[in-house]
Image (cartoon, coloured by chain):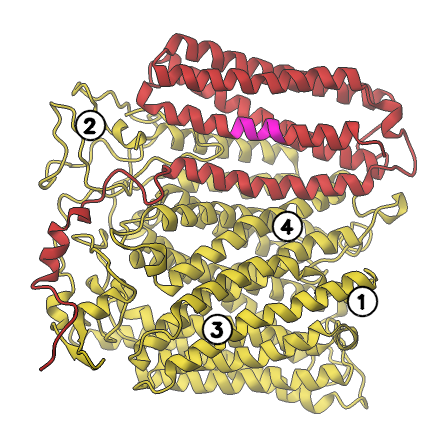
């Protein structure tokens, strides 16, 4: 590849390299411990952990908002929240949970796991990866500062026009929502480009596409969904921004605008969005079920292609969110049919997971319990989803608690159960200690109970006609009992989340007196379990060659002629030992991603409050991008002397670097890289 | 006895010595990371412009204020469109120049591309000014908002492209853009061609299709 030859120590001429200190402002960061190492890191594992930690923090905020909603609805004519505040709380709850919790936990696993699963040392563009994370963090913080600066958005998480206009929502809440989500959209978009390139270009030797772990496949599909869905939301939000801040007429009905435009644009994004939230969890479950069933995933090609099919079909069902908006009988029929069809690939997956467990030697660990939780709860949510495909029924259900029940079954019962299970599963790999199993199982049963108590009654409430997004209800409609049950359930659910947090701390303390957890505590199947736990910075030494799906498993186990499983190697002989990592070339940390991202919220504040701030923010971002572009991806001062055999030789010009992971970034604004 | 179908004496050894174990500079697809990333980014941009073009089509008939036909100056915009499209030619020549190692021509063509792009932007600024004087403000009608947002958005993209071209030119002048970095020029070229192609669509939809 052309760009790699530009590396400082590999100049074809063998001349003294001509790298200058980029900008001369900062010395290149070198910290490998402490907060500085986290701020400047480009390591996909650290970034993944930061995604996870930040998402858990936002989960607390979103959860608190959920509890406020449930407290308000505890009894008829609740007075805890005013109607206005209630609008803000449920809007911010939805927005936080979708954009700042579920999507980022997906990104957390994609970042941490996917490069490990494909045997790469890092993602294709480590600095863009860091930039994505900082955009997410700053966008999320920006969004939540609206609470302190005049109140949150109040139009529901989809902020329908014309309600999102200044006339109906005069506070700055929707501006914060709008601009904050544009910033997190930048995070998603750059992340998507980065991760797709990583999957397509950086797989270990031997790993063809159809030998990739299912989670990696689902990550690929998810990132393609992001790539094509996010820009549509951004386009809609740009229109809304023009309307709200510069008096344009995109949603101004007085000037002949069509509010349905917003609904179409939003849901063209919004429906792929729900699939891109669930597919990472589908991938994770497809990793966990085979491990704890001691069987390969049933029908690997089917599970892969059904995921791809969901990705494609996800773009053709958006208008089922709009059956009552008057889009006409032909549209309604079309989208009814496509919505029914998209249940097919999802059903294929459910069948595959069930068949994977069928006849397996099940070990009922916490990850398996949560996985089964996903399969069952998602099935319930999927079934209520199919009822939405039937337009006459959907017309009755629209904007009732039935819808709320449905999407919590798929997003909480589906995605979130999968994520928590995967936290239990991958915790030893990331942190080197196991989470307590007893607490984990308690956590699962409590979460399952709380979840069903909270959301199952909402089916009934919805069919009884209780509207969502209304801050209270009158006595005598039969809503009292189920609302009380749901509120009790919500508190059990919140306790189970706190129990999970407690388990993290408890297990960490306990781990000190336990022997270190090995590379492969679960007798797992995919190659990420070959790395020492916690994963060293360099991931693999050496990079494994992959010959089949579940490669690691078949390094440990062989099959007799009659198909019986026999162990052929001890786990300790197969896994990699921790090495000193010398001679492995890793991308160097950088300040610039956080600098470039820091300017964006300033620009956003500036758009709302004072254009001068825009200027400052713009300068910071542009300076960040130029600093970044002029900084070589590798530190010229970093020690390279320890290159092993096959390393570069500097005098005859044959530059044989061992790694490709540190390729220079170049994206739209980052093209102007200097040469080494 | 257990007869195994798959085993290594020492897997670690096999990994270390397998011919493929040393990661080559080649990527799995054979397309470099940077170029693939740019293609993906451009694919995403299609949807962004798709949303804005759709919006324009929906709103091109204003309820009040000047109509498209009253204000468009088709010959003028055709000329500036021609200038923009010619910049794709000079961009190709720039890429070809650096691939041949002809740095002098590279600078000439990079400069020419940036200049043609800047001419297009100047034309757009002039056009906006004229339209504004003729009574088509940003907030005048649904048509005016959609027109300015779509074409303005494209203008911003061209401007970003010009900034990248000028940055490349400066790098080249400082001797920091050797031949083996030709892909950087090529990737910027991809972006530039995309912006031009989008303009073909916008020009056709906005100016040529009768409403």
Residue lying at the far front in this picture: please name it: A561
> Where does label 1 land, which residue?
A324
Q: Residue at x 81, y 33 (%)?
A: B144
| Colour seen for chain A | yellow
First reached walking from the N terminus: tag 1 or tag 4: 4
Q: Please indicate whether residue A42 sits to the left or right of residue B204 in the image.
A: left
How many C-alpha atoms fall within 10 Å of the one at disc 4: few (<14), some, or many (≥20)?
Answer: many
Subunit that carries the residue with mark 4: A
First reached walking from the N terminus: tag 3 or tag 4: 4
- Image quadrant containing the N terminus of chain A: top left
Nearer the observer: mark 3 or 2; the answer is 3
Disc 1 to disc 3, how far (Cα)?
31 Å
> Is residue A145 placed above or below B120 in the rendered structure?
below
> Where does label 3 land, which residue?
A349
Q: Please indicate whether residue A214 sits to the left or right of residue A232 in the image.
A: left
In the foreground, B27 or A515: B27
Residue segment shown in magenta: B191-197
């Amino acid at each position: 590849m052309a760009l790699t030859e530009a590396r400082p120590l590999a100049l074809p001429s063998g001349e003294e390299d001509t790298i200058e200190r980029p900008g001369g402002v900062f010395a290149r960061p070198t910290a490998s411990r402490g907060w500085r190492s986290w701020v400047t890191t480009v390591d996909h594992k650290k970034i993944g952990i930061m995604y996870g930690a930040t998402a858990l923090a936002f989960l607390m905020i979103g959860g608190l908002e959920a509890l406020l909603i449930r407290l308000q609805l505890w009894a008829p004519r609740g007075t805890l929240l005013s109607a206005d505040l209630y609008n803000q709380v449920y809007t911010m709850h939805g927005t936080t949970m979708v954009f700042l919790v579920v999507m980022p936990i997906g990104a957390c696993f994609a970042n941490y796991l996917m490069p490990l699963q494909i045997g790469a040392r890092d993602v294709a563009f480590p600095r863009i990866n860091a930039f994505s994370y900082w955009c997410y963090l700053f966008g999320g913080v920006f969004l939540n500062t609206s609470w302190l600066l005049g109140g949150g958005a109040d139009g529901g998480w989809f902020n329908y026009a014309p309600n999102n206009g200044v006339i109906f929502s005069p506070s700055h809440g929707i501006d914060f929502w709008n601009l904050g989500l544009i910033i997190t959209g930048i995070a998603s978009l750059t992340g998507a480009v980065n991760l797709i390139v990583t999957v397509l270009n950086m797989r270990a030797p031997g790993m063809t596409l159809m030998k990739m772990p299912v989670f990696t496949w689902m990550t690929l599909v998810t990132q393609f969904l992001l790539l094509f869905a996010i820009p549509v939301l951004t386009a809609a939000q740009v229109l809304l921004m023009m309307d709200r801040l510069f008096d344009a007429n995109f949603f101004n009905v007085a000037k002949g605008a069509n509010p349905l435009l917003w609904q179409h644009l939003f849901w063209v994004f919004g429906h792929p969005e729900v699939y891109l939230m669930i597919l990472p969890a589908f991938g994770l479950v497809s990793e966990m079920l085979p491990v704890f069933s001691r069987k390969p995933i049933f029908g690997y090609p089917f599970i892969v292609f059904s995921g791809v099919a969901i990705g494609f079909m996800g773009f053709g069902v958006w208008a089922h969110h709009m059956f009552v908006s008057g889009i006409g009988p032909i549209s309604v029929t079309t989208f009814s049919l496509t919505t029914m069809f998209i249940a097919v690939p999802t059903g294929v997956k459910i069948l595959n997971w069930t068949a994977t467990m069928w006849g397996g030697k099940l070990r009922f660990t916490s990850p398996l319990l949560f996985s089964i939780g996903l399969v069952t709860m998602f099935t319930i949510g999927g079934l209520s989803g199919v009822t939405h495909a039937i337009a006459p029924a959907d017309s009755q259900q629209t904007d009732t608690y039935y819808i709320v029940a449905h999407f919590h079954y798929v997003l909480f019962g589906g995605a979130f159960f999968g994520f928590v299970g995967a936290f239990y599963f991958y915790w030893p790999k990331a942190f080197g200690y196991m989470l307590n199993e007893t607490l984990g199982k308690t956590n699962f049963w409590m979460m399952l109970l709380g979840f069903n108590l909270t959301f199952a009654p909402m089916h009934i409430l919805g069919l009884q006609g209780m509207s969502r997004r209304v801050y209270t209800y009158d006595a005598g409609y039969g809503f009292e009992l189920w609302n009380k049950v749901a509120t009790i359930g919500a508190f059990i659910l919140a306790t189970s989340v706190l129990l999970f947090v407690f388990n993290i701390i408890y297990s960490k303390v306990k781990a000190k007196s336990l022997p270190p957890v090995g590379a492969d505590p679960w007798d797992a199947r995919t190659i990420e379990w070959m790395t020492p736990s916690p994963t060293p910075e360099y991931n693999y030494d050496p990079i494994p060659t992959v010959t089949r799906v579940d490669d690691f498993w078949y390094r440990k186990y062989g099959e007799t002629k009659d198909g019986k499983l026999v162990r052929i190697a001890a786990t300790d002989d197969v896994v990699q030992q921790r090495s000193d990592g010398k001679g492995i070339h890793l991308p160097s940390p950088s300040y610039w991603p956080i600098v470039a991202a820091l300017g964006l919220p300033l620009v956003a504040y500036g758009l709302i409050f004072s254009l001068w701030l825009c200027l400052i923010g713009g300068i910071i971002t542009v300076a960040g991008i130029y600093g970044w572009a002029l900084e070589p991806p590798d530190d010229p001062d970093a020690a390279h002397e320890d290159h092993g055999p096959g390393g570069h030789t500097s005098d005859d010009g044959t530059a044989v670097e061992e790694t490709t992971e540190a390729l220079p970034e170049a994206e739209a604004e980052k093209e102007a890289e200097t040469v080494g | 006895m257990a007869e195994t179908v798959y085993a290594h004496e020492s897997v670690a050894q096999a990994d270390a010595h397998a011919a493929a174990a040393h990661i080559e500079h080649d990527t799995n697809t054979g397309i470099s990371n940077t170029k693939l990333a740019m293609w993906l980014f451009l694919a995403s941009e299609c949807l962004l412009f798709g949303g804005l073009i759709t919006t324009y089509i929906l709103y091109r008939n204003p309820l009040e204020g000047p109509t498209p036909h009253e204000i468009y100056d088709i010959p003028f915009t055709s000329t500036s469109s021609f200038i923009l499209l010619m910049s794709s030619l000079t961009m190709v020549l720039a890429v070809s120049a650096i691939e041949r190692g002809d740095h002098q021509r590279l600078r000439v063509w990079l400069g020419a591309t940036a200049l043609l792009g800047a001419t297009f932007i100047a034309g757009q600024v002039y056009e906006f000014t004229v339209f504004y004087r003729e009574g088509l403000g940003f907030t005048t009608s649904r048509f005016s908002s959609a027109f300015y947002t779509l074409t303005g958005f494209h203008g911003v993209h061209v401007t970003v492209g010009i900034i990248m071209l000028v940055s490349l030119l400066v790098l080249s002048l400082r001797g920091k853009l050797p031949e083996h970095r030709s892909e950087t020029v090529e990737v910027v070229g991809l972006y530039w061609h995309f912006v031009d192609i989008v303009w073909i669509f916008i020009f056709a939809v906005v100016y040529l299709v009768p409403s």
